Amino acid sequence: MIDFDKDIRYIKGVGPTRVALLNRLGIYTLEDILTYFPRDYEDRGKYKLISELENEETAAFKAVVTSRVTETRVKRGMAIYKVVARDETGTVVITWFNQSYIKSALTVGKEYIFYGKVKKGIGKVDVQSPIFEEVGKSKNVGKIIPLYPLTNGITQNVIRGIIENAMKEVDGKFIESIPGWILQKYKLCDINFAMKNIHFPNKFEDFERARKRIAFEELLTLQVALLQMKNSVKVENNGISFEINEHIEDLLESLPYKLTNAQLRVWKEIDSDMQSEKPMNRLVQGDVGSGKTAVAMLAMFKAVRNGYQASMMAPTSILAKQHYLNISKTLAPFGIRCELFTSEITKKKKEMLIEDLKNGKIDIAIGTHALIEDNIEFRNLGLVITDEQHRFGVRQRGLLSSKGTRPDVLVMTATPIPRTLAFILYGDLDISIIDELPPGRQKIDTFAVRRNMEERVNNFIIKEMKSGRQAYIVCPLVEESENMDGLKSVTEQFEYYKNIFKDFKVEILHGKMKPKEKDEIMARYKAHEIDVLISTTVIEVGVDVPNATIMVVENAERFGLAQLHQLRGRVGRGSFKSYCILKYDSNSDVVKQRMEIMQKSNDGFVISEKDLELRGPGEFFGTRQHGVPEFKVANLFTDIPILKQVQVVAKELLEKDENLLLEENLPIKQKIEKLFNSEEFNTI
Ligand code: ADP
Ligand code: MG
């Protein structure tokens, strides 16, 4: 049996200094070093003829040295070594700088493999500082060479050597963790072939097969883990059953609008979850403005009518307050008491609220993170809602839930997750989608413009303001160190626009301001005491201002599409025609494509799929924001075809062996246990 947990220091070639360096790379055990995969490969396996060498390429070629090495001292401490070599198609002059060992390293008449950068002029070929090895004795040329991520003090040669030694120790005895029937069905190579060829492939096709198999395994492990988690939640039937359904009709009638079909459908799904004894764990996705709050309100109403308390957490105090105002206004006539919990309420008031909440005198608590503070207790919390889930960690959701006994949980988000990924990100949640906007919403016209349109844009804003409308101008967050390349910070923009819009009231809003100041500015903007708000993305999820009709985004190329879409959703909330103007400053094709998508589409799902496609999942989701474990090889975007196969096969596997008790499934089971114990998974 090979001990894959063996400390790295027992591997040949690893002394005390290297142990420290390897630790710095996150490598502690034999397994760690074996799964330290290359970041790239260099093809030193194909030899070119000298006549085929091209200017500026890095290439390998075989040639016989035909001259002795010459040494030229250019100035003090600087020596140039030159040698001439040839094959049947031509001659090259090879140059090294300051490497005196060259003098004795090459022998006239011997054939070497050289690998280096080519400089081609008229009638001559130069190669600079190539690495070289005698033909027949080569180790580092003449094949595909893996390149590993490094740290100071370790070279490619060193790490490659250590990995070679580690591979020798295992000697083809890796443990197969994918059951044979899956390997066969998807024509995957076995683990030993995969491990050898991900590090030291002879051909790129072999590397591809190896990579595919390892990605498959990573995705399969996660997928089986998520499915198991989901299945285990399903069988627990000890949640709250909210049976009383009275007065929902009255509430619906009291609303100034009729629910859309999509809202009704999603409400039915929530309603039946709440009815059932199984704890609800549901994600509601819906584009900005699709009316998620109304649906959440129905759920809270139902909980309260069944004698329970409900709580709703929002990411900003502005948003919490807006929810509070809306919801308390609608529910007060039914004798339901709603209170707002944010960090801004006075100490005295807070003490009173805490007391009332504990005694069950408050039915619904709406607020920010203030809700998950230790001293907040409920009498009988039955329903927990988090709004704009993408702003919270899953842990925070859990903290709020823990204030009740298996309460029903509803999570709302306006960031549509592409379907292929929804399960990975929210594996433990059922998903409802509100895929329809309330009737009568006007389409927001979107324009992407370059800097030369600035004046026209400004004039357009002035025209709108003269007819009584308001505008938002959003700037990206700029770090001080970045300020050079024409990016302006929000305060600079504020100074600039105050001057441009002299006849109007211009204000600034950014994340560094005190919550109270922010609230005040938003309240004044809503009351139309401010015409233009220059802000950072703090308004991304914010207050409804129906009179605002223009959303300008500065340096739109710096934002994700999903975020731009979210910002755009701040306007078009009233009956006036609204506009979104994306100012960008880049010649990149990707940026142009992204701007085009924003102009063409108003559908959050389409936009997020495209965003993911153009940027890749890392940037799309932000690092670990969603608690997705990082993969060593798999890529959540480019490997979607594999992900699809894995989603099918994981189900099949668990249908055959629900608890992974079969011998062939033990390795996966162990991998899952490891995954759940890992730090990454526990931050979810
Ligand atoms: P979001 O999904 O972005 O949270 P909200 O719930 O805040 O959307 O709703 C946006 C606006 O649409 C609110 O002013 C709300 O009163 C209104 N609204 C919600 N549902 C409907 C509907 N069915 N018909 C008309 N207006 C609606
Ligand atoms: Mg909302």
Image (spheres, rainbow, N blue to C red):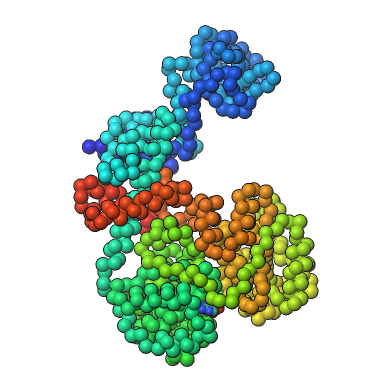
Identify whether 158 is placed above or below 592.
above
Quadrant assignment, res 681: bottom left
Q: Nearer the viewer, residue 665 or 618?
A: 665
User: Residue at position x 58%, y 21% from top?
Assistant: 52
Identify whether 525 is placed above or below 231.
below
Q: Position of residue 425 (x, y in %)?
A: 42, 59
Q: Position of residue 462 (x, y in %)?
A: 76, 71
Q: Position of residue 457 (x, y in %)?
A: 74, 64
Identify whether 119 is placed above or below 108.
below
User: Residue at position x 26%, y 43% from top?
Assistant: 180
Instruction: Say whether residue 208 is left or right of residue 584.
Output: left
User: Residue at position x 32%, y 30% from top?
Assistant: 168
Instruction: Say whether residue 592 is left or right of residue 163.
Output: right
Q: Is residue 218 visible?
A: yes
Q: Nearer the viewer, residue 457 or 258?
A: 258
Q: Nearer the viewer, residue 21 or 254?
A: 254
Instruction: Say whether residue 610 is left or right of residue 203.
Output: right
